Each structure stands twice: as C-alpha cells, then as structure tokens.
Amino acid sequence: MSRCETEQIMRELQAMRQMGYHAHIAVLLGWCFQNDLPSLVFELAQQDLHNYIQKFREPPESCMPLKQILSVAWQVSVGMQYVASFNMVHRDLAARNILLYDGFHAKVN
C-alpha cells in the first residue's frame, strides 16, 4: 500500500470519527495497524446489497419485492443526507457498499 493510500484511509477514519453514530451509517468499531497497514474495523453485517440482489437473477424469485426496494432506497437516502450534512461526499456509493442487517436494516459503508 502506498503512502498516498494510507493517507486516504487515515482521512476516511477522521471523517468517520467526525460524523459519529447514525442509524444508517455503518458503525466504525475501531482501527489498528496490521503489518504496517491501516485497518478499519466495522460492525458485522449479514450481507451487502449487491450480493442480496444477485439472487433475484434466477427464477422463480425474479424480482425484489417493491416494499424492500423502497425501504432500502429510503434508508440509504437518509444515511447519505447525514453524510452531506457534514459537507462531505461519499464518492463510492454502490450496492457493494450498502450493508444489510437483521430486519432488513440498511447502512451505508
């Protein structure tokens, strides 16, 4: 990992610390250096949204229920609104960065 990448991770760590807790943002539990590389430790999710929607490509489950789509979209928008309230930009919002927890609770990572 280059010095530039390490500095980027440290900036992300500082941003996460500045934002604090929010119900729709993945919780940063801690961080450490492992083999001289920074590692961020987040709460454990059941799966990410990308892996979840992959199962709907195969019949008979050919579409994701509308209620779940709207719920995830709303939760992600609330999380991103919180990020934006700090004048920050996520820059990598994608299905792989939306984590799903018990009860279909979605959080932005």
Image: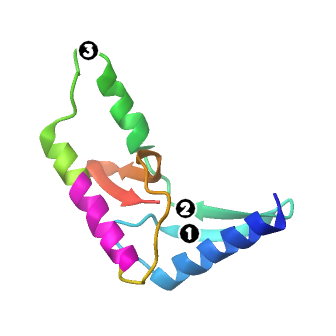
**Magenta stretch: dominant SS?**
helix
Type of amino acid at the residue the image marks with label 3? Pro
- Pick whichever, 87 or 49, lies toward us: 87
Asked which colour scheme the image uses, the reply is rainbow
Which residue carries the number 1 mark? 29
Mark 3 or mark 2, earlier in chain: 2
At horizontal 41% and vertical 60% (from top left) the residue drawn is: 108
Spatial distance from mark 1 to mark 2, Cα to Cα? 5 Å
Q: Quadrant of the N terminus?
A: bottom right
Which residue carries the number 2 mark? 42
Discs 3, 2 touching: Cβ within 8 Å: no
Spatial distance from mark 1 to mark 3, Cα to Cα? 38 Å
Note whether 50 is above or below 98 in the view shown: above
**Helix, strand, or loop for circle 1?**
strand
Residue 52 is a magenta residue? no
Note whether 80 is above or below 68 in the view shown: below
| Boundaries of the magenta span | 73-84
Say which mark, if any, is on residue 59: 3
Residue 23 in sight: no
| Residue 87, horizontal then vertical, whole percent | 42, 83
Mark 1 or mark 2, earlier in chain: 1
Discs 1, 2 touching: Cβ within 8 Å: yes
| Residue 85, horizontal then vertical, whole percent | 35, 82
At horizontal 21% and vertical 59% (from top left) the residue drawn is: 74
Say which mark, if any, is on residue 94: none
